[in-house]
Amino acid sequence: MGMSLEKVSSFAPLPIRVMAGIAFIIHGLPKFENIQGPQGLLGSVGMPPELALPIALLEVIGGIALILGIFTRITAILFAIEMALVTLIIKSGNGFTGPQGFEIDLC
């Protein structure tokens, strides 16, 4: 007998979790190589530069957690807060689209 639709659909979030996890890891790892860069960026927008390390840790450890499917709700909430703050504090001056926009410009 085949798997029921309910069992198969329970795996639907898996590719999204894996892709998001990989994306956060890819963005987090370089922060460890040059922590001064993110610290400078945070300081330039009025945020505490000391947040660079916790942000890098969140992105890498949270990305791994998403891929493994552990602590997904907590991780998702922390990522949502991080991305909302990045959008509001760092990207807001660049407008919604354009060369330095919110990274959604498809052109």
Image (cartoon, grey):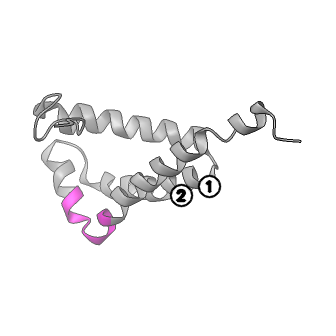
Q: Is 61 within the magenta? A: no
Residue at coordinates 62% horizontally, 38% vertically from top-left? Answer: 12
Q: Is 36 within the magenta? A: yes
Location of residue 9 in the rendering, given as x and y in whole percent from the top left corner: 69, 34
Furthest residue in direction right, as rendered: 1
Residue named by callout 2: 64
> Which dot marks residue 30?
none
Q: Which residues are magenta?
A: 30-38
Location of residue 106 in the rendering, given as x and y in whole percent from the top left corner: 21, 36
**In the shown orientation, is residue 1 left or right of residue 8?**
right
Which secondary structure, mark 1? helix
Which quadrant is the C terminus positioned in?
top left
Residue at coordinates 44% horizontally, 41% vertically from top-left? Answer: 79
> Which amino acid is tagged 2?
Ile
Furthest residue in direction bottom, as rendered: 33
Which secondary structure, mark 2? helix
Location of residue 47 in the rendering, given as x and y in whole percent from the top left corner: 23, 44
Residue named by callout 1: 68
User: How far separated are the C-alphas under marks 2 and 1?
Assistant: 6 Å
Residue at coordinates 45% horizontally, 56% vertically from top-left? Answer: 22
Which quadrant is the N terminus positioned in?
top right
Mark 2 burial class by Cα count in 10 Å: few <14, some 14-19, many 20+: many
Location of residue 66 in the rendering, given as x and y in whole percent from the top left corner: 55, 50
> Which amino acid is tagged 1?
Leu
